[in-house]
C-alpha cells in the first residue's frame, strides 16, 4: 500500500496536509526518511514515525457526510486569518473527516466530507469528469453568443475549459438571471471568471450537486450523513474503481 493512501485511510489528516508533510520529510518508515507519497509500506510490519514519534494507526471505517455551507465561511478546517470555517458547523461529527475540494468564501451549498481518501482523489481528478452542478445568479441576461461559447468550451487565462451545460431557470424583476450550470472540472473560481469574461458577473453561487449526491432540502449550516445506498449509487454511476 502507498504511504499516502495508508495515512489517508487512517484519517491522519487531509490529503493536502498529508502530501505536504511527506514532501517535507516528516515521516520515517522503518528508519528511512520518506519524501515520496507513493512509497510502498507494509502496515503490519513497518514502523512509521512522524516527527520522530511512532504512529499507532489502523484504517478507519469509511464515513461520508454532506454539509450545506453558508456564505462567509471558509471551506477548510482552519483559517490563518481567523475567519469562520466549516469546522464551526461540523463539531458534532465524531469521525475525523475532511472536505473534498473547496467552495469559495462568497458561495454556499454542498460540500462533501469524508475520510475516504481514494474517493476524494477520484472526485478531484479532472480526468474522471465528475460533474458538479451550481445555481448561479448572473448580472443581466445571457445572450445566445455568450451561451454558445460557454457550451462549446473556450480558452480562459491560457487554459481550455471543458464545455458548460447551461439551463436557464428564471429572470428577476431587475433583469438578472438564474441559471443551472454543470461543469466537469474544478479550476479555482472557474464559474466566476468565465461569466465575468462573458460580461455577466456572478452575483450569487450555490453548489447543489456533486455527481449523484444532491443538496436536497438540507438547511444552510446543517449536515447529514450519507446513506450507504447513496454511496453505492455514486460509485456505480461514476465508475469508481474501488
Image (tube, helix red, strand yellow):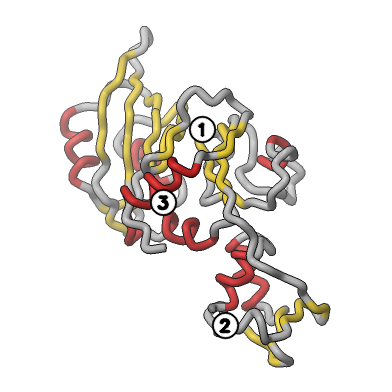
Q: Residues within 10 Å of mark 3 (few under 14, many from 20)?
A: some
Number of marks in the rendered image:
3
Depicted 74 relative to depicted 97: above or below: above
Q: Nearer the viewer, mark 2 or mark 3?
A: 2
Which residue bears the numbered disc 1?
A: 109
Secondary structure type for disc 2: loop
The answer to which image quadrant residue 198 occupies is top left
Residue located at (58% from left, 73% from top): 4
- Secondary structure under badge 1? strand
Answer with mark 1 or mark 2, whichever residue precedes in sequence.
2
Residue drawn at (42%, 31%) of the image: 202
Give the Cα distance between marks 1 and 2. 35 Å
Point 37% across, 37% down: residue: 133
> Residue reaching furthest right?
53
The percent coordinates of residue 215 (x first, y second) are: 47, 31
Q: Earlier in the sequence, mark 2 or mark 3?
A: 2
The crowd level at tag 1 (other Cα within 10 Å; few <14, some 14-19, many 20+) is many
Q: Which part of the image, by quadrant, shows the N terminus?
A: bottom right
- Packing grade of label 2 (10 A; few <14, some 14-19, many >=20) is some
Q: Nearer the viewer, residue 186 or 129?
A: 129
- Drawn side of residue 75 relative to residue 201, left or right: right
Please determine whether, in this image, residue 184 is positioned above or below residue 91: below
Q: Is residue 241 above or below residue 148?
A: below
Q: On residue 207, which mark appears?
A: none
Determine the residue located farthest toward the bottom in the rendered image. 31
User: x, y percentage for residue 171?
Assistant: 32, 14
- Residue that numbered label 3 is attached to: 186
Q: Residue at x 21, y 34 (%)?
A: 147
Task: Describe residue 150's horizontal placement relative to residue 140 as left or right.
Answer: left
The residues tagged by marks 2 and 3 sit, at their Cα atoms, a distance apart of 25 Å
Residue 36, label in figure: 2
Amino acid at each position: 500500500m502507498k504511504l499516502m493512501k495508508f495515512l489517508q485511510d487512517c484519517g491522519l489528516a487531509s490529503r493536502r496536509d498529508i502530501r505536504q508533510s511527506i514532501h517535507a520529510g516528516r515521516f520515517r518508515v522503518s528508519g528511512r526518511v520518506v519524501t515520496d507519497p507513493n512509497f510502498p509500506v507494509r502496515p503490519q510490519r513497518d514502523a512509521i514515525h512522524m516527527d520522530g514519534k511512532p504512529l499507532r494507526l489502523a484504517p478507519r471505517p469509511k464515513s461520508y457526510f454532506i454539509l450545506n455551507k453558508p456564505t462567509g465561511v471558509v471551506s477548510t478546517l482552519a483559517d490563518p486569518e481567523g475567519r469562520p470555517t466549516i469546522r464551526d458547523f461540523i463539531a458534532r461529527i465524531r469521525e475525523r473527516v475532511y472536505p473534498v475540494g473547496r467552495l469559495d468564501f462568497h458561495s454556499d451549498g454542498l460540500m462533501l466530507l469524508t475520510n475516504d481518501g481514494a474517493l476524494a482523489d477520484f472526485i478531484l481528478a479532472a480526468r474522471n469528469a465528475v460533474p458538479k452542478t451550481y445555481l448561479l445568479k448572473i448580472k443581466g441576461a445571457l445572450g445566445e453568443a455568450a451561451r454558445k461559447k460557454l457550451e462549446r468550451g473556450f480558452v480562459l487565462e491560457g487554459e481550455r475549459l471543458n464545455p458548460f451545460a447551461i439551463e436557464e431557470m428564471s429572470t428577476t424583476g431587475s433583469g438578472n438571471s438564474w441559471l443551472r450550470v454543470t461543469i466537469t472540472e474544478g479550476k479555482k473560481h472557474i464559474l466566476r471568471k468565465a461569466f465575468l469574461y462573458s460580461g455577466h458577473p456572478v452575483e450569487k453561487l450555490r453548489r447543489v450537486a456533486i455527481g449523484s449526491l444532491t443538496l436536497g432540502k438540507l438547511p444552510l449550516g446543517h449536515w447529514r450523513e450519507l446513506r450507504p445506498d447513496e454511496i453505492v449509487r455514486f460509485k456505480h454511476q461514476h465508475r469508481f474503481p474501488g
